[in-house]
Amino acid sequence: MAILTHSVLNELGPDPRQNIHTIVSKASELLKCDCAAYGCLETASGDLRFRVAHKLPARPSAIRELVRRICSEIISSGKAAAVCALSSTAAVGKPARNELATGGFKSFLGYPVAVSGEISGALIALHTRRRTFSEQDRFLIGFLAGIVAIEESCHQREEALSRRVALEKMLKELSTKAIDTEDSAAFIDHGLRLIGSRMGVGGAFLWEFTPEKKSLARSHAWLAEGRAAMKPGGEQIPIESLPREFGRLMKGDILRVTDTRQMPIKQGWELLEKAGSRACLIIPLFSQEVFYGCIGLECCRGPKTWASEDVLVLQTAAEIIMRCIENRQLTHELVANRKNLEKAVARKTLALRAANRRLSEKIAAHKESIQALKQHEELSSLLKTKSSFVYQCLTPMEIQVADLVKQGFGNKQIADVLNLSRRTVEVHRYNIRKKLQLDKTHTNLKTFLASME
């Protein structure tokens, strides 16, 4: 026995998956059986699948399904040393034994596989002949199951590490793209596709809360390849259909629904099934402390247990997407404010132009008033002189002509200064002499005016 176990260990390498294949094939060889298999429960869904099926009939196969059922019964028995054989302590009933015999197998030996203290798989060897397995056979399959458990634990750790690295890389890519994006709607679609595909779910969705309709509306969606489209009516979920769940979301609680059919309100899980969900993880979204909506992942194949890592990754992705949504809202507000500001500036500019025009008119009128006042003051100054009584009977133009005559200007010079014709100047001089009662005398007008000073 020591030689056999040593030979198995010598064939193991650094790859846990390959080692599990080696151990299962060795189980078939060392136990002198025709085929062997290792089935384990999926962490998320709880379904049993074969990690290795050495020489089992290809799918679909009734024998394959029967072996799957036997593995499930070995796991559910919960006995650390559970050994099953058709010839003695069988773990299946007579109908199952008949089905197995119909497929050409007369006996089997199985042993549970416990990983991290929890039974999550089974190693089974099947024979076409009826036989009784010895204690050595039972010890050997128990030993091999223990090695499978070690390799499965290593494989799960490697898978978890690889998944964590992939998810961290996904979040980094998402964050980088959020900084460079100009189209927020396209970024959200890309983000949902990235999150859903990397996390291995059936769909990823963004729901926006509509206060007027009191419902959640699906605004963005990604569906895995082969996933059926949503049924009619699945795009809107009224608050009244799931009051407890909506209340929790609006308080900021995270919803982990392992199985929608286990929800207390039938109408609620029927709505989620219309949307194609059998299990969902939902993270609430808030913008400036106001409930905006939620982002969610769904599994459509069946129930799923959501790990803490799933929640953390989706929370981080939700924060990145929410920042992008807020940036989009801020951009729209800035554009609207800019347009309003431009309109206000245009209105103010028109008002200022009108006010400036009115002010220019007032300034021009004021200048005219000042000029008229100046002329009035000049005339008044003239009238205040000793000869004011002479000028009181003269017109303004005649006063100007008289003043120039007094200064010694001739008719032609006066005409040039006042922009008048010589004949007009002569008429003004005649009128001045007449008004000063010099028309009937030979007194010189210049001499007379000078004598009045």
Image (spheres, rainbow, N blue to C red):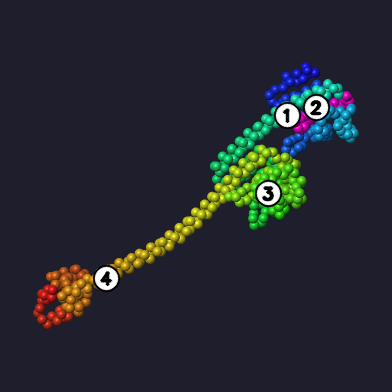
Q: Residues within 10 Å of mark 3 (few under 14, many from 20)?
A: few
First in sequence: mark 1 or mark 2? 2
Mark 2 and mark 3 in contact (Cβ < 8 Å)?
A: no
User: Residue drawn 72% across and 22% down?
Assistant: 12
Q: Secondary structure at mark 2?
A: strand
Which label sits on residue 36?
A: 2
Q: Name the residue beneath numbered marker 4.
A: 373
Q: Secondary structure at mark 3?
A: helix
Which label sits on residue 152?
A: 1
First in sequence: mark 4 or mark 2? 2
Magenta segment includes 67: no
Residue 334 horizontal/vertical position (percent): 52, 52
User: Residue drawn 43% across and 59% down?
Assistant: 349
Q: Residues within 10 Å of mark 1 (few under 14, many from 20)?
A: many
Q: Which residues are magenta?
A: 106-132
Q: Quadrant of residue 225?
A: top right
Q: Secondary structure at mark 1?
A: helix
Vertical order, 362 against 142 (above or below): below
Name the one closer to the observer, 238 or 115.
115
Which label sits on residue 248?
A: 3
